[in-house]
Image (cartoon, rainbow, N blue to C red):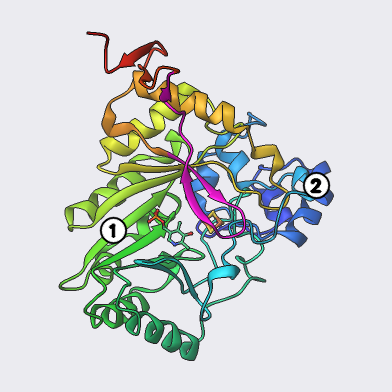
Amino acid sequence: MNASRPIRSAAELVEAGLVPSERVGDIERVAERYAVAVTPAMAALIDRSDPSDPIGRQFVPDPAELTTLPEERDDPIGDLAHSPVEGIVHRYPDRVLLKAVHVCPVYCRFCFRREMVGPQGLGTLASDAMDRAVAYIAAHPEVWEVILTGGDPLVLSPRRLSELMERLAAIDHVKIVRFHTRVPVVEPDRIDEALIGALKASGKTTYVALHANHPRELTEAARAACARLVDAGVVMISQSVLLKGVNDDPDTLTALMRAFVETRVKPYYLHHPDLAPGTSHFRLSIEEGQRLVAGLRGRISGLCQPTYILDIPGGYGKAAIGANTLRETADGCYAVSDFRGEEHRYPPDA
Ligand SMILES: *Cc1c(COP(=O)(O)O)cnc(C)c1O
Ligand code: SF4
């Protein structure tokens, strides 16, 4: 097997020592249903001696994925409900998603768009569809920000990315272009001068939202890739999913958020896992999530605090669901909780 290309099948997972050979049949059945890819950088991070390794859990298929619960949905966050033209999701007035590609360098086992991404997914936007998507943005002056997601937009070649950026740069009312990606972590060498140059366009501000879920993903190579982006003037924010068996404990979340901040990536969102099919083994309760997030407040710097987010099923958008620290008291004042959980009256008694 060639260690310089991604693992894409059950047989290759066995060959790489990531799946015991007696389980190859089960894994094949999962791979028939949901796309599989593990990049060399991620395969190298997985501890083969630990069956519950948090990196392996994110990328190595699990037969539990074949169990779909009634509340799980093919389109968990309701993208299709708000898609005026192919490739565009316009849910909030001032920003649109532009889904140029539906492939990723890795396929996360908990992916919220798992029914749309992958080799059998929606593919790459055809050039006439891309023309219509760009025309839609140009015709909507309220669109201040374009968010490239997918799929992972940084799988596009620097040439195609810069073409796209030039087209967006020609639209005056678009001020911010944001890329949601896993590439700096899962394929850090891809972040080279040509690609970074392609992400920038004069007069526009480029943001890169980095998706990572465990502190071990922030390897030396990943940190160096982020440093190249930030040094070039790209602003970086983070995006993580709170996942059972990956990062659902205070020490791991602390290390993850600190790793982002040390890397000049500002923690942005910590998502409650979406109701994607075959992902119930990753979901914890909202109460557990709130407890974990509240625990971070007293423990680590304000720079390290993400917002805990639920994407409301059906296309209603995102809601911040962090623990409520404020309640009204019977006498019309407030009780506010400090980071230790102790309540204080507001305003305080005279
Ligand atoms: C998540 C999402 C966004 C981005 O939301 P922010 O809160 O700005 O990060 C925009 N549009 C859609 C359709 C989304 O699902
Ligand atoms: S990188 Fe994002 S879109 Fe791609 S498989 Fe992972 S979660 Fe899904």
Q: Is mark 2 within 8 Å of ligand 2?
A: no
Residue at the spot x=51%, y=29% of the render?
Answer: 290
Q: Which residues are magenta?
A: 308-329
Mark pair 1, 2: CA separation = 37 Å
Residue ID for mark 2: 67
Front-most of residues 114 and 15:
114
Looking at this rendering, what residue extends furthest in the bottom direction? 128
Q: Amino acid at mark 2?
A: Thr
Few, some or many C-alpha atoms within 10 Å of disc 1 (few <14, some 14-19, many ≥20)? many
Residue sitting at 42 percent across and 57 percent down? 181
- Measuring from the top left, give residue 341's x and y in whole percent: 42, 14
Please tell me in which quadrant of the rendered image residue 233 appears: bottom left
Q: Is residue 236 left or right of residue 307?
A: left
- Residue 268 circle label: none
Q: Is residue 343 above or below residue 176?
A: above
Indicate the quadrant where residue 243 lies. Answer: top right
Q: Earlier in the sequence, mark 1 or mark 2?
A: 2
The local secondary structure at tag 2 comes to loop
Is the residue 329 above or below the residue 113 in the image? above
Give the tally of numbered discs: 2
Q: Residue at x 62, y 58 (%)?
A: 314
Q: Is the N terminus in the top left, top right, bottom left or bottom right quadrant? A: bottom right
Residue depicted at x 28% and y 29%: 302
Residue kind at label 1, given as amino acid type = Tyr
- Would you say 126 lies left or right of 326 here? right
Q: Mark 2 Cα within 10 Å, few/some/many (few <14, many 20+)?
A: few
Q: Position of residue 40 (x, y in %)?
A: 51, 51
Residue 42 at x, y percent in the picture = 51, 46
Secondary element under disc 1, as helix, strand or loop, is: strand
Label 1: which residue? 207
CB at mark 1 closer than 8 A to ligand 1?
A: no
Instruction: Place residue 342 in its image quadrant.
Output: top left
